[in-house]
Image (tube, rainbow, N blue to C red):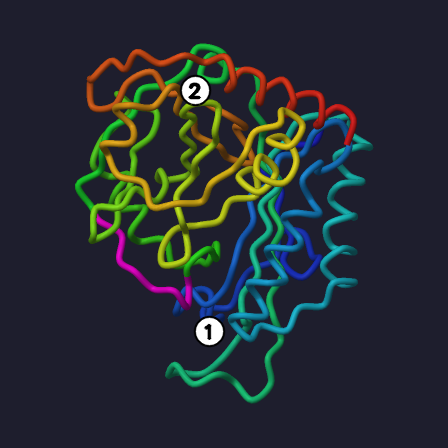
Amino acid sequence: MSLQLPIITINGVLNASVSPLDRGFTYGDGLFETCRYFAGRIPLWNFHRDRLFASAKRLQIPLDEVKLQEYLDSLLTLLRTNQITDAVVKVQITRGEGGRGYRLPDVINPTYCIGIFTGVPLESNSFSDGVDLRICDLRLGKNPALAGIKHLNRLEHILARAEWRDEFAEGLLLDVDDNLIEATVSNLFVIKDGKLFTPDLSAAGVAGVMRRAIIDVFAGQLNLSVHIVQLKMSDLVVADEIFLSNSVFGIWPVNSIDGLELELKCSVTHQLQQKLLAWLKNA
């Protein structure tokens, strides 16, 4: 019998349950990573692990790397044994069980939840042909203490995504000062005059793993200078290229925003996509 997805483990146990006293359930007190599994491995795992442990340190959640890797490896072995070559791996870490109230427990025993979900091909129509975006009405609040972290409190993004059905592939999010920050599940990049620009996420937004790969790996391979700046809507109108990045779907070129067709090129975006594809196959 073939492996039926999704499969989920709690602290390494298949089909276990999370306690209603778990602080991830009661308060959203935790973190998560959504990773692309490809050809027997998670190519971006080092970046996911770095963000996960750095974020846990900021939230004062003590993680056991050996335990996490053991739980993860057991599921990856299951995928390999069943010859599954493409999947989505979601790692969720909570602070564990606690009583009522926001005070941190005296003893913290994190909950490790790992799920394996059906994957989708990276080279989709959106990857090759580009996507249409909208501007979300919701504005992100500023909070430097949580900025950059992929924590379990995602209500802003849920409400933003509720603004449309499927007529757009993604929605752009601005902060309360009308600075462009990100999209609901992806990061934003702008190319202008051969330079790469992406929003400053020091006060809001999620510092994505694919965003880091583009900044730290692929941009250098193409001799692109990277600038982390405050971006406004006016910067999109004069851009040469615009694209979105996400660790699962990769890189999507942008064609239009709120019905406005932009006269955009895609040459550098396509070069970045090719660098990504080559890196995934050889990582």
Q: Provide the secondary structure element on which disc 1 rests.
A: loop
Residue 131 x, y percent position in the rendering: 37, 18
Residue 71 is left or right of residue 57, and the answer is right
Please give the residue where the numbered disc 1 appears in the rendered image. Answer: 21
Which kind of residue does numbered mark 1 sit on?
Leu
Measured along the vertical axis of the image, is residue 111 above or below residue 5?
Answer: below
Residue occupying the point 38% across, 64% down? 144
In front of the other: 148 or 198: 198
Which kind of residue does numbered mark 2 sit on?
Pro
Q: How many other residues sit within 10 Å of disc 1, few (<14), some (14-19) or many (≥20)?
A: some
Q: How many other residues sit within 10 Å of disc 2, few (<14), some (14-19) or many (≥20)?
A: many
Residue 143 x, y percent position in the rendering: 34, 64
Please give the residue where the numbered disc 2 appears in the rendered image. Answer: 253
Q: Nearer the viewer, mark 2 or mark 1?
A: 2
Residue 241 x, y percent position in the rendering: 40, 20
Residue occupying the point 50% across, 64% down? 30
* Quarter residue 165 falls in: top left
Q: CA distance from mark 2 to mark 1?
A: 43 Å
- Residue stretch rendered in magenta on the structure: 139-146
Residue 21 is left or right of residue 93, and the answer is left
* Quarter residue 228 falls in: top left
Q: Earlier in the sequence, mark 2 or mark 1?
A: 1
